[in-house]
Image (cartoon, helix red, strand yellow):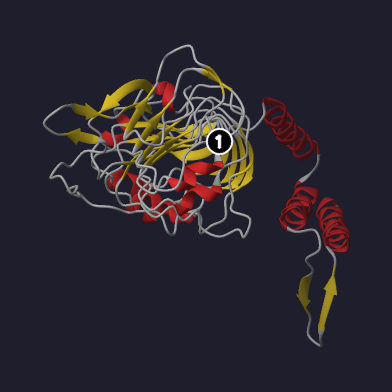
Amino acid sequence: IPQCLSNLKIVNLRKNSLDGSIPDEFHSGALTQTLDVGFNRLTGKLPRSLLNCSFLRFLSVDNNIIEDTFPFWLKALPNLKVFTLRSNRFFGQLSPPDQGPLAFPELHILELSDNRFTGSLPTNYFVNWKASSVKINEDGSIYMGDYKNAYYSYVDTLDLQYKGLFMEQGNVLTSYSTIDFSGNKLEGHIPESIGLLKALIALNLSNNAFIGHIPLSLANVSELESLDLSRNQLSGSIPRELGSLSFLAYVSVAHNQLTGEIPQGPQFSGQAETSFEGNEGLCGLPLQGNCLSPPTQQPMEEDKEEEEGVLNWKAVVIGYGPGFLFGLLIAHVIASYKTKWFVKIVGPDNHKEVDPVSLFMSLDSRCDSFNNKRVM
C-alpha cells in the first residue's frame, strides 16, 4: 500500500492481493473519509495515526490477517459511522477498560465477527450508542458514503451478514444500525441496554457462549428485521413480547437451551424449523408436535401388584365367617387410610384411644364370642 494516503478523500483498495501493513502515515489534518482495504492479505496492527483522520466516516479492514486488540481509541473520531473488522485475528476484551459503555458517538454499523474476542459485555455496554432516526447528510443525501460532485460519484459498499446470508450492500441509509459479534468467544449475559438501539435492523450474536435469558428489552427495538442468537447457551423461554416486532423477518435461536412454547404469530410461525432446532425444551410451531404433555400412565407392574392385592383380600374374606369379616373390613379401612391415626371409642365414663391393631383384635374377639353363643 502506498505510504501517502492522507491527502486522499476516498481510499478504496478492496479485493486486491495487497500484503504488508496499513501505513502509519496519516498526518494531522488528513482529509480521508473512506478507508477500505478489505479482502487483502494485510498483517500487523491498525495504525494509531488514524486518530488524525477526524473526517473518517467509513473504515473497513475485513478479511485480512491483522492481529491486534480492539481499538477503543477510535472512539475519539467524531464522525465514524461504519467500522468492520470481520475475519481477522483481533483478540482480547470487547469491554472498555473502565467497564463502561463503548461510547462511539456516531457509530451505526459494527462488524466484529470471526475473530478471537473474549470476555463478557457490561450491562450498560450500548448506553451511549447512536439510537438514530432518518438523518440527512450535509450534502442532502441520506446514505452513508454517498459522495457526489461534478467530477465523480461514489458510494461506499460493505458485506453484511443479514437474514442468514452474506450480501454486498451499498447505499446504506444513515438511519440503519447493525451489530455483528458472531463467531467469537464472548460469554456472560446479553446486555439489557441493547434495547436502547431504536434504529437497529440486524443483530447477530451467534456462535458465542452467551448465557442467561433472551433480553426482554429487545422488544423495544421496533425496527429490528434480522435476529440471530443461535449456537450459544441461552436458557429460559423466548419472550412473547418479541411477537410485537412487526418488521422481524428472520429469527434464529437454534442450538441453545431454550424451553417453553415458541411465541405464535407471523414473525415466528413463518420461520423455518431449523431456526429453533437444537433446543430440547422448545415446542410449538414451526416445530413438529405441540406443547401438550401426554397423560401420565402408571407402570404395568404397579397395576398388576394392585390387582393381585385385591384378589388376595377377596380370598381372605371368603375364607372366614361373618364375624371376622366385619372386624377385618373396619380395621383395614382405618389402617389403610392413615396408619398413625387413632380411633376414639366412646364409653359411659371416659374416652379411650387405641390404635387400629388393638381395635381389630377387640372387634374380632367380640365377633367370635357372638358366633359361639349363636352356635350354642
Find residue 344 and report its image quarter: bottom right
Residue 271 in the figure: left or right of residue 101: left
Q: Residue at x 53, y 22 (%)?
A: 64
Closest to the observer, 150 or 289: 150
Residue 300 in the figure: left or right of residue 4: right
Residue 272 lies, in percent from the top left, at 36, 22
Closest to the observer, 344 or 282: 282
The answer to whether any part of residue 288 appears in the image is no
Closest to the observer, 151 or 119: 151
Q: How many marks?
A: 1
Q: Which residue is mark 1?
A: 46
Residue 232 lies, in percent from the top left, at 57, 34
Q: Secondary structure at mark 1?
A: loop
Residue 333 in the figure: left or right of residue 358: left
The answer to whether any part of residue 208 appears in the image is yes
Amino acid type, mark 1 = Leu
Disc 1: CA contacts within 10 A as few (<14), some (14-19) or many (>=20): some
Q: Residue at x 79, y 44 (%)?
A: 321
Residue 308 lies, in percent from the top left, at 74, 30
Q: Residue furthest bottom?
A: 349
Residue 14 lies, in percent from the top left, at 40, 20
Closest to the observer, 152 or 286: 152
Q: Residue furthest top?
A: 17
Q: Residue at x 52, y 29 (%)?
A: 22
Find residue 21 and report its image quarter: top right
Give above or below for 349 relative to 116. below
Q: Residue at x 81, y 88 (%)?
A: 349
